[in-house]
Amino acid sequence: MTTMRLQQAFSALALSGVLAAPAMAEVVLASDNFNSYGNGALAGANSGTGWAGAWTGSAAASVNNQALAISGNGNTLATRLLSQTINSNVIIRFDFTLSAGSLQDNDFLALWLGSESSNNPNIGLKANCGGGCTNDLFVRTSGSDAGGNMQDVVLGTTYSLMGYLQKTAGATTYNRFDLWLNPTAQEINTLTGFDVSDTGVSGLSAFNRIGFRGANLDAGDVIRIDNLRISQVPEPGTLALLGLALSGVALSIRRRQR
């Protein structure tokens, strides 16, 4: 079989869905789009997939028009247990909207992993980076600094955030957090082209709990969160096995065409 004919065969298989790109082998571990809840308190709401129980939290976290609405402060505004413990690289995705109010320096609303400890990774809002710049959206592996940050948040504009939390260079705890704002399909599939990144040793090696923490939000400020999803990234060995499988398909096609 000629090289051209082999390439054409692979293209046909890819279009038919028989072959899938290794970079797309993302496994969704937990998700909630808040569509199954009526308006009212979030605490006790129990839908989505991959969770060990219902949401818990304070009166400042509610459901409004099929989204999570946060309008106050606290370390555990909305928390939930996962049905499994995660200790591998993960992708965190959600939509973020400042739907009412205005931002002042150091207004804060972030999703934390593991616990509300400042030593654990966060992703979300820290207005004006907490001082020293004008950007608002951020990721950080630990600490009270803003970490990687970008974008001035505009009232009423919805932003899609994607964070890739990793253990790099043989680390046993998470030590890198990449952030994409409104990622493209290619960026989602390949995890390339991140907008900002933060590195540093965190206190987190595994987690089975997530939550939202708010600080310095004023009366009238409302932040909406929607389409929350936590996904696992395949280990390199898994992708290598998939590559071997694709090589086997190529060899089989070539032998049949002789």
Image (tube, rainbow, N blue to C red):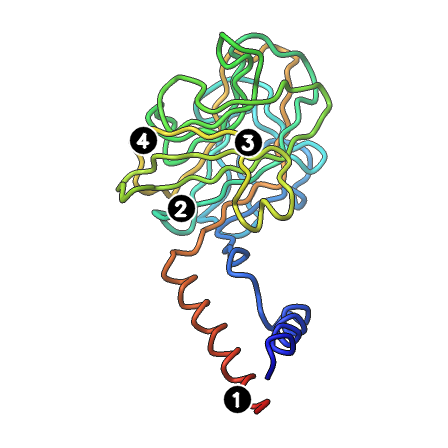
- How much space separates mark 1 and mark 2, taking CA atoms? 39 Å
Q: Which of 108 and 14 lies nearest the eye of the viewer?
A: 14
Name the secondary structure under disc 1.
helix
Which residue is disc 2 drawn over? Answer: 89
Mark 4 or 1, which is nearer the eye?
1
Q: Which residue is mark 3?
A: 195
* For the residues bearing labels 4 and 1, Cβ distance under 8 angstroms: no
Q: Nearer the viewer, residue 170 or 61?
A: 170
Instruction: Judge the density around disc 4: few (<14), some (14-19), many (≥20) Cα neighbours within 10 Å.
Output: many
Is 96 on the left-hand or right-hand side of 234? Answer: right
- Nearest the eye: 89 or 42: 89
Quadrant, the N terminus: bottom right
Q: Secondary structure at mark 3?
A: loop
Label 4 and label 3: CA atoms lie apart by: 21 Å
Earlier-in-chain disc, 1 versus 3: 3
Left-right relation of 187 to 209: right
Question: Compared to 1, does 47 lie above or below?
Answer: above
Q: Residue at x 45, y 51 (%)?
A: 232
Would you call the spot at circle 2 few (<14 residues within 10 Å), some (14-19), or many (20 or more)? Answer: some
Mark 1: few, some, or many residues within 10 Å (few <14, many ≥20)?
few
In the depicted structure, whether residue 16 falls above or below residue 25: below
Disc marking residue 202? 4
Residue position marked by numbered label 1 in the rendering: 255
Q: Residue at x 66, y 46 (%)?
A: 36
Of the residues shown, which amino acid type is indicated by label 4?
A: Ser
Question: Considering the numbered disc 2 on the image, is that residue within a helix, a strand or a loop?
Answer: loop
Three-letter residue code for mark 3: Asp
Disc 4/disc 2 C-alpha distance (Å)? 14 Å
Dot 2 or dot 3, earlier in sequence: 2
